[in-house]
Image (cartoon, rainbow, N blue to C red):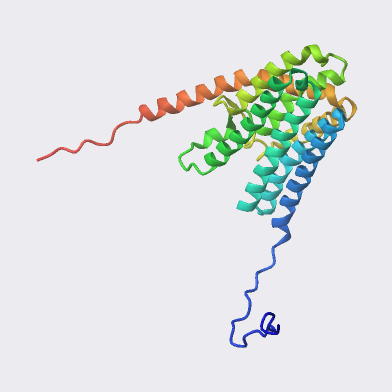
Amino acid sequence: MDDLFPPFAPDPNEPRPRRFKPVPFRMIAPNMITLMALCLGLTAIRLAFEGKFEPAVIAVVAAGVLDGIDGRVARLLKGTSRFGAELDSLADFVNFGCAPALILYGFALFHLKSAGWIVALIFAIAMALRLARFNAMLDDPNRPDWKKDFFVGMPAPAGALTAMLPLYLHFLGLGGEGWAAPAILIYVLAIALLVVSTVPTFSGKTMGKRVPRSLVLPIFLFGVAAFGILISYPFEALVAVSGGYLLTIPVVAAQYRRRAKAETGTTTDEPAGPAISGG
């Protein structure tokens, strides 16, 4: 029996175990924000199973707010990492793909049985495909700088928040009963197609880098007013934001086409190099 479990004696000639350097907190903080957003998304799924759709929607909206913060915190603290980018994509799929799809199915799409579940699946998978395409485009070195002002297709947070527009209207007493399920199905399918489409949408990533001094105080006042409206009238504000965002898509697409045409014209109108005569 002693041969079966020999005592362990470390080899004195074995090199010392490798020591890893401590991870700075600036690398951990953005990932903690992402994990909190992921917890909100998972909690929203649980609340949807319990039929508590109002707090479920609020949890998804809060996850969207945290999603907009974690990347900026990472860049501010210079704590960006490949691990953080992959974790953020995973959290976005759960928060803005799975959670809204299950909430919408439990709210209205279940009335349509298999057809409603198929549309919920399409929405979730469309979000996964959109996130995969976004990650692939980050590695494109030939992408012009002006295209940073635009997303290709509807971004994940915007897709999730606009897809839940029927819920906001229901909370305001404007419908959402079983008879409205076919219209909700068509609307959610349209949002899923916008998510995976190549329609350019507004990015806003380059905004706010430099703010004129004359606009600082008005921006403060506007931010306070917007926060107060969101807290006092949350679903009215979400209806207005969702509707306004959908209305801006044709305008942004037209602006994208103008800038693309201007870039093409600049490229083709460049003078040729000096001619070299032979002989």
Q: Residue at x 25, y 36 (%)?
A: 274
| Residue 203 in sight in this render | no
Q: Position of residue 160 (x, y in %)?
A: 71, 29
Q: Quadrant of the C terminus?
A: top left
Q: Residue at x 84, y 21 (%)?
A: 236
For residue 7, what is the image quadrant? bottom right
Q: Position of residue 17 (x, y in %)?
A: 63, 77
| Residue 209 in sight in this render | yes
Number of marks in the image? 0
Residue at the farthest bottom position: 12
Q: Position of residue 25 (x, y in %)?
A: 73, 59
Q: In the rendered view, would you say 149 is above or below 241?
A: below
Q: Is residue 92 left or right of residue 13?
A: right
Q: Residue at x 67, y 54 (%)?
A: 79
- Looking at the image, which is closer to me, 142 or 136? 136
Q: Quadrant of the N terminus?
A: bottom right
Q: In the rendered view, would you say 225 is above or below 80?
A: above
For residue 170, what is the image quadrant? top right
For residue 102, what is the image quadrant? top right
